[in-house]
Amino acid sequence: MEPLIALVGVTLVLWSAGALGVHRLRPWPVALRGGLAAMFALTGVVHFVGMREELVAMVPPALPAPELLVTVTGVLELAGAAALLWSRTAPWAAAGLAVLLVAMFPANVHLALTGTDLPPHQELLPRTAMQVVFLAAATAVAVAHVRGWARCPASREAEESMAGH
C-alpha cells in the first residue's frame, strides 16, 4: 500500500504545484514521473533494508537464486527511479520499469496464493489492481514522450529542470 500512497501523493503534490503556477511542473507527465520516481525509490530501498527477507520469500520456488533476484530487481528499481528524473532517459526508464513490473508479477501472485494471515491489501485482487495502476503510470510516461508531450517547450523546460540543467 505504501508504494501506491507514494505514487499518488507525490504525483498530486507535483501536479498541484504546477497548477498553482510552478511552470516547470505544469505538464502532467513531469508530475507522474516524479511520483513514479518516488515510488520506485521506496520499493528499491526495501529490497535491501526493512523487507528484504519478505521479498526473498516472495520469489516463486521455480526461480533460482532468490536473494540475487531481489538484489538485481532492487538495483533496477533504484536505477529506474533515478533515470525517470532525467528527460533523456525518462521514457526508456518508464518502459523498462513497466517490463520489470510485468516480470515481477509472479512474485506477487506467489505471495498472495501462499501467504498466510495477509492483510486485505496483500490479497491477490488488491495486489493485482495496484500493479495495474503502477504499470499504467509507467506506460503513460513512456507513451507521453512518444506522442510528443516531452517535446513541447513547457514540458522540455520542466524535464531539464528536473535533471538539474
Image (cartoon, rainbow, N blue to C red):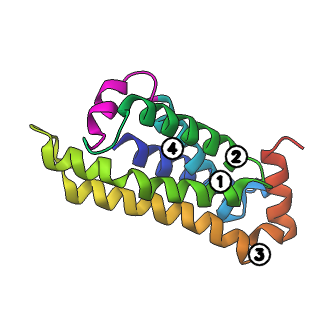
For the residue marked with disc 2, what is the amino acid?
Ala
Circles 4, 1 touching at the beta carbon (< 8 Å): no
Circles 1, 2 touching at the beta carbon (< 8 Å): yes
Q: Of marks 3 and 4, which one's residue comes earlier in the chain? A: 4
Magenta span contains residue 55: yes
Q: Residue at coordinates 37% horizontally, 26% vertically from top-left?
A: 52
Circles 4, 2 touching at the beta carbon (< 8 Å): no
Picture quadrant where residue 81 is located: top right
Q: Of marks 3 and 1, which one's residue comes earlier in the chain? A: 1
The spot of residue 161 in percent (x, y) is 83, 47
Q: In which quarter of the image is the N terminus?
A: top left
Instruction: For residue 122, say whether it is visible.
Output: no
Q: Name the residue carrying label 2.
A: 83
Q: Name the residue carrying label 4.
A: 39
Choose mark 2 or mark 3, whichever is in front.
2
Q: Residue at coordinates 62% horizontally, 45% vertically from top-left?
A: 80
> Distance of mark 2 from mark 3, alpha carbons?
19 Å
Q: Name the residue carrying label 3.
A: 148
